Image (cartoon, rainbow, N blue to C red):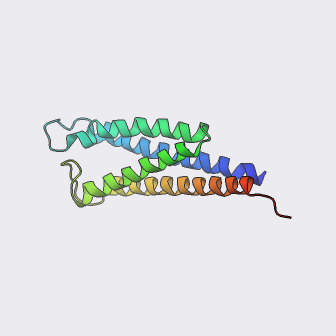
Amino acid sequence: MGNRFLPTALRVIAAVLVLAGGAIHLQLWLNEYRDVPSDVEGAVVVNPGFLVSAVVSLVLALAVLFVRRPIVWLLALLFELASIVALALSRQASLLGWTEDGWDGDAKRTIAVEILAALALVVLLAVDYARSGRRTRPATA
């Protein structure tokens, strides 16, 4: 049971965390960012950017859950890392002209979920790599 359960559990955990990050972006888009006028500098980052992020998160979460290919998990990891960098840039400098002050509760919650998703995906990739190494290693006498 242990050999099959761990990768499945990791896929479920990673998918839930990727989906949670998308849900946060959707909630923020619905509550705050969908009405940002397009003439505001950097508005494309949050409107439509947060809606796109939510949709991509949903697609990636489903792919992580149902497509048992490391390339899918790597793509999800890259997306999470890009989201983390984008959030940090918007707080520390500017992301395509969009800046926000400070780390409010939404920003802290978002970065926490995205870091956890990235970590879960790294662990999933590492476990898969370790398992595939055991399968391809030649037998010793």
Give the residue displayed 77% in from the left and 57% down from the top. Answer: 138
In this view, the residue in front, 141 or 83, is 141
Give the residue displayed 60% in from the left and 47% down from the top. Answer: 11
Query: Which quadrant of the figure contains the C terminus?
Result: bottom right
Spot occupied by residue 30 in the image (x, y as percentages of width and height): 32, 36
Residue 36 in the image: above or below residue 111? above
Give the residue displayed 59% in from the left and 53% down from the top. Answer: 124
Tell which residue pokes out farthest to the right in this image. Answer: 141
Spot occupied by residue 75 in the image (x, y as percentages of width and height): 47, 45
Label total for image: 0
Is residue 110 in sight in this rendering? no
Spot occupied by residue 134 in the image (x, y as percentages of width and height): 73, 57
In this view, the residue in front, 29 or 13, is 13
Residue 59 in the image: above or below residue 85? above
In this view, the residue in front, 12 or 36, is 12
Is residue 127 in sight in this rendering? yes
Give the residue displayed 35% in from the left and 36% down from the top. Answer: 52
Relative placement, left or right, of 88 versus 116 is left
Spot occupied by residue 137 in the image (x, y as percentages of width and height): 73, 57
